[in-house]
Each structure stands twice: as C-alpha cells, then as structure tokens.
Image (spheres, rainbow, N blue to C red):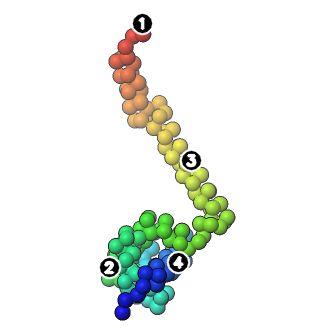
Amino acid sequence: MTIGRREREENQQLAFSLMMTALGDQAIDTTIFDSDVSPFAESILRTTWEELARGEYVNRIRGAQYRLTPKGLARGIAASGPAKSDAYRERLGKVLAAMKSHVKDATNRKSSTCGPWGRIERARRADLQHHRKPRE
C-alpha cells in the first residue's frame, strides 16, 4: 500500500510532535526513540522513520532505535509549535544569554596576560612590534 504525499507529511509532523514530547528537556544525544514501542509503534509508519533518516533528521542507532539530530531538533521545534509561545522564547533567551556570557569569559581568559594564553599573546605582540615598520 502506498500513501500520498499529504499523508506522509502529516505522519512526519506527528513523528516530530511525539519525539519532542518524549524529549522534553533531555539532551538529544542521550535520548533514543524506539519505533517499536508506544507511542511511536501505533502512530508512525516504518517508511516515515526511513524518510526521516534519509533526510538526516534522525540517526538509526540499532534495530528500530533512532536518535534525533540537531537538524531534526530544529525541525521538531518548528513542527511542534512551542517555538511560537512566549514561554519558549523566554527560556531560549535565558539559554542564549548564558551561552553568550560563557563564550565571553572564555574569550577574555585567552586574551589575558597571565597563564599560557597570556604568554602566547605577549610573544605575538612582541613579534608584531619587532616587525613593524618605523613611521616616517
């Protein structure tokens, strides 16, 4: 039996929705979805899992077990609808702010004048000054 394009797309949407519900706040690299276990076994077609794997939205781990990829996570967020809610946007803003401060801290540590990064930075500056042409 073959199904139409619309039915395939609807089944994919349902798969993403179920995966996002099952994922919750867990990490995508540690969460495995088993297509032979409820709620996936009753709702999601085997061909849907194959299409998701071909599209690189999920990786097949072993047998009927799949793991969501970053591309799949982005699609799942868009498909399941929480990205449109204010609560989701607020949580995302907090995560991005935390990431930004972490990256800034790492950048500042590298450019400080102490430790191994400081020695490298001082050597680089000294080398640049040594090779600088005199001003006329």
Q: Amino acid at mark 1?
A: Glu
Residue at figure coordinates x 39%, y 72% from the top left? 58
Q: Nearer the viewer, residue 9 or 64?
A: 9
Q: Amino acid at mark 2?
A: Arg
**Circle 3 sits in a helix, a strand or a loop, which is it?**
helix
Q: Quadrant of residue 95?
A: bottom right
- Mark 2 vs 1: CB contact within 8 A: no
Q: In this figure, which residue is indicated by the disc labeled 3?
A: 101
Above or below: residue 110 compared with residue 72: above
Check residue 62 in the rendering and tell me which mark sits there, or answer none.
2
| Left or right, residue 84 beside residue 53 | right
Real-space Cα distance between discs 2 and 1?
A: 70 Å
State which tag comes first along the sequence, 3 or 4.
4
Q: In this figure, which residue is indicated by the disc labeled 4?
A: 17
State which tag comes first along the sequence, 2 or 1.
2
Q: Residues within 10 Å of mark 2 (few under 14, many from 20)?
A: few
Q: In this figure, which residue is indicated by the disc labeled 1?
A: 136
Q: Amino acid at mark 3?
A: Ser
